[in-house]
Structure formats: structure tokens, C-alpha cells
């Protein structure tokens, strides 16, 4: 990627400002307050937009800080080349950070509906190829960038499977499934299990007694001739009919049994209904638990894959940092070893030296190498220019010369160097390093 033209309608102190770049190394030279940082912020805003913060933070954010002070529409345009195609992007920041128009810079045909994205986001950009003296030492944000990016497996140059996002999605899905109402319903039914009981033995006894009574009611009493004569005399003289009394008593008992049995049957039906409901819910719960188990297996597989990717990437990153730092220091340090917390050691030909024992300039140079290595490995397709805003404050002439010669000969990236130091211009001239000067 190469930025070719910058047009500012209104941004900070700039109004109707135009400049063109013509070389690999662009040096923006100016005294303090000349607008070097403002110009760098404008180019970054053209690439990624300008977000307005919320609440009290909005009083001090970039959106507020760089509003036009000399008139003009808040925004502008920028021409850049990417993958052999020249684009012109136009933004009006007052309309929102996502509002932009993009054109074919040669024909000015607007590319309607064209999705235009970079591999890296703004946070990754500002922790790799965009550097200032105050921010050169990496911190929590750089660690997050590396951890997030190392968790990516690229299935092709155009698509990436973000494993960290995949795991987050699976965790959210697992939390959602664990909140399913079936779990609460199962627990509730379990607490009620004691109330589902009915007296099955008593019901069985009632049913047996009922059958026996009905049998007795159907039976006709067999009487001898003498019993029949006595029964006739009893009826003749108004005596009690023992058979009728017996049947009345049996029917009365049968009514009582039917009432008691109906109550027990109702209890049985309710218990059977609850048990059936419980079995259905239990089946649903088991299905949910199986899905949760499958999610956890998927998470484990992804984490194992991510761990392997991080291990491989960590080795590649150490090798890349070592290569860059060795070239920058003319072979003084041949190896760099970095752990997961971004703590580094360097090998000086005799032993490994912890970075806390190195000079401030060497440490900054080491972090510089880390940023370059990270950008080359993680976002190779973007190939953003390097934005260097007075990052060499602690460098002596020799170290500065080594670094600039490395950038001149070993990187294909366009370099934007923002500085107010005349000695840097002098050094570039002495070392015959080609550059294009833009005075502010």
C-alpha cells in the first residue's frame, strides 16, 4: 500500500491543505506545533474513520481535538494505491466515522457497494506500524493485539477464522443453553416428587373388594324348602328381609369404595401426569446437556488448535524480531527471545541479557523491531506505511543511522517520518539515503 496524495478541507489547524508524496521515505519536517502529529492523525482517520467518544471522554478525544479551527468541512480526501489499484477515499467526519465515499482514482468512478476492509483494525494498526516516542514501548494493548491475532487461523489469504471470537461465541451459546427453562423445571419437579405419591396398595385392595362385592351382588341366595317357608312366614308377619338388607349394605359399601377409589385414581392420574412431564423434560435436559458437552468439546478442540497456532507463531515472531534486530544493530545482537508477556531477552554472542539491563535506546529499538515483525507477520496483506512520529529521541547518530539504513534497504513499506530534528535530515544526507522532504 502506498499513500500518494493528501487533501485536507478542515482538520485541526489545516484548511485547504494539499500535498503529494513521491518517494519511499517521506520526511515531514517542522518545528513544534507545526502540525506533524495532526497530519499523521488525519491520515489514520482517513483509513479507519474518526470515532467520537461518549460522556466526559468526548471532551478530550481526537474527534473534539481535531475539529477545524480555520474553517472548512471536517474531513478531506486521500489517494492511495493498494494491490495495483488506485483509490480515492473521501470522508466527512462530522457525519460520523463510518461515512465515506470511495472512487477509482483514475476514472473517478464511485465504487458503489464495494466492501473495503483491511486485515488489521485501528488498534492493531496503532500498535504496529504507527509509532510515537511516547508509545513505542508496548503495553497491554499490544499484548491484546498479539494474543488476538495469534488466535487466528487463516484458511486463505482473503478469509480468516477468528478462533477467539469462535470461542467467545461458543461460551455465549453455552451460557444461553444453561439458562434454558428445562433445567429450572426439572429442579422444580424434583422438589415436588414427594407429593406425586398415592397409596397404590390401598387402591389395589379397594379394587379387589369392589370386585368381590359386585360378585356377591350378582349371586342369588340358594334356600332350602324350610328356609323358604320361614322366609314366607317372616314376610307375612312383617319381618325383616335379610337378603335385601344384605344387598343394601353391600351397595352402601360399594359407594364408599367408589368414592375412595376415585380420589386415589385422581391422585394416580396426577402422579402419572407429573411423571410423564418429568420424563419428557428429562429427555429435553439430556439433549441440552449433550449439546453443551459437544460445545465444550468444540471449545477444547479450538483452544488446542489456537495453542498450537500461538506456539508456531511465537517461534516465527521470535525469528522475525531476531532477524530485524540483528540487522538494525549490525550483528551485535543475534537473537531475541520473547515470552507471552512481551518480556524479551537478547543474545549478545556471549549470553542472553534481560531487556531490563539494556539502555533505553536499545529497549526502544527492540520494541521497534517487535512492532515491525508483528506487522509483517500478522498483516502482510495490508502493507501499511510506517508512521514514525519523532520515535528516535533517545537514539544516537550511529543507532539512528543503523535503523534508517535498515528501513531503507530491508522493508518495502512506505515510510512517513515526522520530525523536528535537523540532525536527522543531515544524517540522511550523509548516508545518502533517498527521501522526499515536505516542510510544514
Image: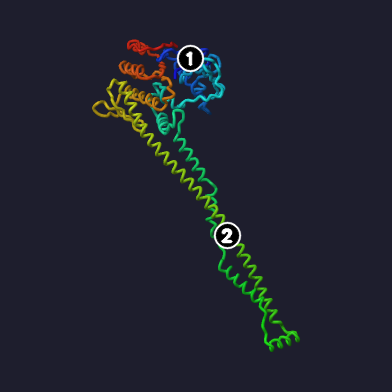
Outermost residue toward the left in this view: 350
Residue 277 versus residue 317 in the image, above or below = below
28 or 257, which is in the foreground? 257
Which residue is found at the position 71% from the left and 88% from the top?
229
**Image quarter hosting the N terminus:** top left
Residue 393 percent coordinates (x, y): 36, 18
Which of the numbered marks, if any, corresponds to residue 138? none
- C-alpha distance separating marks 2 and 1: 80 Å
Which of the numbered marks, if any, corresponds to residue 5? 1
Residue 404 versus residue 371 in the image, above or below = above
Image side of residue 322 versus residue 178, left or right:
left
Looking at marks 2 and 1 on the same chain, the residue that comes earlier in the sequence is marked by 1
Q: Quadrant for residue 259, please give it.
A: bottom right
Residue 144 percent coordinates (x, y): 42, 31
Which of the numbered marks, if any, corresponds to residue 272? 2
Which residue is found at the position 50% from the left and 27% from the top?
57
Amino acid at each position: 500500500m502506498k499513500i500518494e496524495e493528501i487533501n485536507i478541507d478542515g482538520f485541526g489547524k489545516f484548511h485547504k491543505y494539499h500535498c503529494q508524496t513521491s518517494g519511499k521515505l517521506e520526511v515531514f519536517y517542522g518545528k513544534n506545533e507545526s502540525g506533524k502529529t495532526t497530519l499523521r492523525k488525519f491520515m489514520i482517520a482517513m483509513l479507519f474513520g474518526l470515532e467520537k467518544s461518549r460522556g466526559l471522554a468526548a471532551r478530550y478525544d481526537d474527534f473534539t481535538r481535531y475539529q477545524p479551527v480555520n474553517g472548512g468541512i471536517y474531513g478531506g480526501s486521500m489517494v492511495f494505491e493498494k494491490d495495483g489499484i488506485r483509490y480515492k477515499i473521501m470522508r466527512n467526519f462530522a457525519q460520523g466515522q463510518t461515512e465515506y465515499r470511495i472512487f477509482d482514482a483514475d476514472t473517478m468512478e464511485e465504487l458503489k457497494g464495494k466492501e473495503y476492509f483491511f486485515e488489521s483494525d485501528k488498534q492493531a494498526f496503532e500498535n504496529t506500524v504507527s509509532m510515537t516516542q511516547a508509545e513505542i514501548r508496548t503495553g497491554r494493548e499490544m499484548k491484546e493485539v498479539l494474543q488476538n491475532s495469534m488466535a487466528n487461523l487463516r484458511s486463505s489469504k482473503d478469509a480468516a477464522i477468528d478462533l477467539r471470537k469462535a470461542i467467545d461465541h461458543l461460551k455465549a451459546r453455552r451460557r444461553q443453553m444453561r439458562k434454558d427453562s428445562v433445567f429450572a423445571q426439572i429442579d422444580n419437579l424434583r422438589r415436588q416428587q414427594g407429593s406425586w405419591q398415592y397409596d397404590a396398595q390401598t387402591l389395589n385392595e379397594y379394587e379387589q373388594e369392589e370386585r368381590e362385592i359386585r360378585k356377591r351382588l350378582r349371586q342369588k341366595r340358594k334356600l332350602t324348602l324350610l328356609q323358604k317357608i320361614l322366609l314366607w312366614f317372616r314376610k307375612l308377619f312383617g319381618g325383616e328381609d335379610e337378603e335385601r338388607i344384605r344387598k343394601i349394605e353391600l351397595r352402601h359399601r360399594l359407594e364408599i369404595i367408589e368414592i375412595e377409589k376415585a380420589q386415589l385414581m385422581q391422585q394416580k392420574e396426577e402422579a402419572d401426569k407429573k411423571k410423564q412431564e418429568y420424563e419428557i423434560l428429562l429427555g429435553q435436559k439430556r439433549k441440552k446437556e449433550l449439546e453443551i458437552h459437544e460445545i465444550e468439546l468444540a471449545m477444547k478442540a479450538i483452544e488446542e488448535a489456537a495453542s498450537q497456532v500461538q506456539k508456531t507463531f511465537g517461534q516465527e515472531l521470535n525469528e522475525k524480531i531476531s532477524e530485524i534486530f540483528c540487522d538494525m544493530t549490525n550483528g551485535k545482537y543475534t537473537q531475541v527471545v520473547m515470552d507471552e508477556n512481551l518480556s524479551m531477552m537478547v543474545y549478545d554472542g556471549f549470553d542472553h541479557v534481560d531487556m531490563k539491563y539494556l539502555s533505553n535506546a536499545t529497549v526502544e529499538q527492540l520494541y521497534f523491531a517487535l512492532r515491525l515483525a508483528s506487522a509483517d507477520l500478522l498483516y502482510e496483506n495490508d502493507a501499511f506505511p510506517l508512521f514514525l512520529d519523532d520515535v528516535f529521541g533517545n537514539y544516537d547518530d550511529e543507532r539512528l543511522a543503523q535503523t534508517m539504513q535498515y528501513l531503507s534497504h530491508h522493508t518495502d513499506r512506505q515510510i512517513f517520518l515526522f520530525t523536528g530534528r535537523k540532525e536527522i535530515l543531515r544524517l540522511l544526507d550523509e548516508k545518502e539515503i533517498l527521501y522526499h522532504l515536505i516542510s510544514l
